[in-house]
Image (spheres, rainbow, N blue to C red):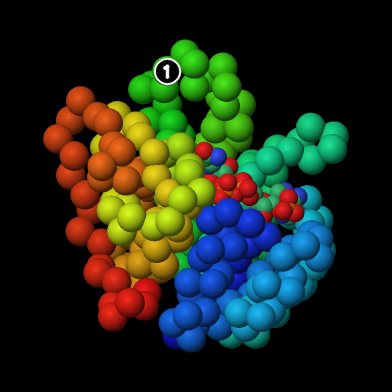
Amino acid sequence: MRPVLIFGASRGVGFLLARLLRQSGIPVFAMLRSEAARADLEAAGVHVLFGDAFSVSELDRACALPQAAFDVVSTLGGRGDDGRFVDDEGNINVIDRAAARDVRRFILVTSIGCGDMAPYRSERAIAAFGAAVDAKTRAEQHLKRTIPSGTAIRPGGLRSEPATGRGILTTDPEMHGFIHRADVADLIARALRDDRTAGRAFAAVDADQARSINLVTPFPLVARGNGHV
Ligand SMILES: NC(=O)c1ccc[n+]([C@@H]2O[C@H](COP(=O)([O-])OP(=O)(O)OC[C@H]3O[C@@H](n4cnc5c(N)ncnc54)[C@H](OP(=O)(O)O)[C@@H]3O)[C@@H](O)[C@H]2O)c1
């Protein structure tokens, strides 16, 4: 049971993942940049430290913390006050600092539309999120070069509703659709345990909210065990 170091655990998918992993007794470290989620995470048994993904030295401190082989999940997204994207620069910093330590699995949460999915983006999606998605693609490319066993998980539109248990991973580049944040957390937790996901990129959508011109073919991800990941 390797510890998991999460970047982006203050809210959304990262927060839900931290709690899910703790329910299975997995040691979790989370780097936050504000106090807001600290109490909730610590109550779940998460080891919290503070730092900013634009700071290489703060990331280095975070990656040194597990003191043994560890896994990383990054759900970082957004822009700094000066307009820089954490989606590329922050994630690239995390990848480099983790690679300098004993990282094993690295899961980078990006977005539908990244990498080989780019040609299938709608004009509307390009106008609304194109720059952030392109930044996430640059982080995916850096992950592939630096940690070849890394995995990119590209969610569709995110909804903050209870898990449906119908989340799927798929390599279909023409996939579109939606997924609940809790289901993305479940898929990440299972992908961490499934070495067949290493070195690959997947879209993550809800099977009942998925749209593609191709037959929907879910990756046969390891099942969740007994109510736990
Ligand atoms: N919204 C969608 O429909 C959608 C669709 C596809 C993919 N995605 C991507 O999926 C991922 C998860 O999304 P989400 O909505 O669950 O989470 P989110 O609200 O986008 O969370 C982003 C996380 O990044 C952290 N962060 C941002 N800049 C940081 C910095 N400089 N240093 C440290 N932490 C920083 C935030 O911390 P703070 O709380 O401190 O700001 C927060 O924990 C994100 O990468 C998102 O872009 C979103």
The correct choice, above or below, for 25 with respect to 119 in the image is below
Where residue 55 sits in the image (x, y, percent)? 81, 56
Where residue 144 sits in the image (x, y, percent)? 47, 50
Is residue 135 shown left or right of residue 35?
Answer: left
* Label 1 CB-ligand 1 distance < 8 A: no
The correct choice, above or below, for 32 with respect to 228 in the image is above
Residue farthest to the front, as pictured: 162
Residue farthest to the right, as pictured: 82
Which image quadrant: the N terminus?
Answer: bottom left
Q: Front-most of 63 and 112?
A: 112
Q: Front-most of 115 and 183?
A: 183
Asked whether residue 74 is in view, the answer is: no
Helix, strand or loop at mark 1:
loop
Where residue 93 sits in the image (x, y, percent)? 69, 53
Where residue 61 sits in the image (x, y, percent)? 77, 72
x 81%, y 65%: residue:
35
x 63%, y 57%: residue:
11
Asked whether residue 224 is in view, the answer is: yes
Q: Pointer 1: residues within 10 angstroms few (<14), some, or many (20+)?
A: few
Q: How many marks?
A: 1
Q: Amino acid at mark 1?
A: Ser
Is residue 8 shown left or right of residue 156?
Answer: right
x 24%, y 29%: residue:
212
